[in-house]
Amino acid sequence: MEPAKEIKSENTSTEGMEHIFAQEEFQEQEQILAQEQEEQELLPQDIQAVELVPVSSAAEAFNKTRRYISKLAKDGRILAEKNDKNQWMVELESVRCFFQEERTKERTVPEHENKGNRSVREILEQERIKELKNRNEELEQEVRNAHYRLGYLENEMGRKEEQIKLLEDRKHKT
């Protein structure tokens, strides 16, 4: 019986390898930034922060009466919502677009937009829900396709295994 071999351990150091660790840390930071950017890209581009102002401010900004702006909000011709005090808060960009398009007399608000009692946030949430439902349907179809393909491939593997068994049986018989 041979004697056990002695294992010598050597002390190691990371001296002179700082550039390698710095490079790894830099790569990790790049990955984190890339992930954050990817998450931002997944958000819909058309959903942005909405600035809501009182009817009086909008009326003053566009040289119209408060009553007229309130009527536009109530009729759903501009994006608006009521606050806690039951006062209309309107989205300035919507008002600007309305008056710009009013010149051509072709302004119509789609049915899914505000009808006086829905908040802008609710409208944006519903649009996002529609997008997510569509994406969900696409992914479900991809899963169904993958499941079908998996079944097909499993069937083909079974057929190949049977052929292999038949070939092995033929070899043993000869």
Image (cartoon, rainbow, N blue to C red):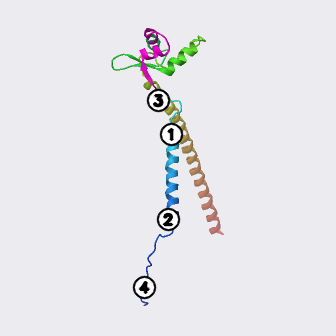
Residue appearing at x 56%, y 51% in the figure: 154
Lower sequence index among marks 3 and 1: 1
Q: Please name which of the two marks, 1 or 4, marks the residue nearer to the observer.
A: 1
Q: Please name which of the two marks, 3 or 1, marks the residue nearer to the observer.
A: 3
Closest to the observer: 17 or 113?
A: 17
Q: Is residue 47 above or below residue 62?
A: below
Residue appearing at x 53%, y 30% in the figure: 46
Q: CA distance from mark 4 to mark 2?
A: 33 Å
* Residue contact at pointers 4 and 2, CB within 8 angstroms: no
Q: Is residue 171 above or below residue 54?
A: below
Q: CA distance from mark 2 to mark 3?
A: 44 Å
Quarter of the N terminus within the rendering: bottom left
What amino acid type should be assigned to the residue bearing mark 2? Glu
Residue on which disc 3 sits: 49
Residue on which disc 2 sits: 18
Residue on which disc 4 sits: 6
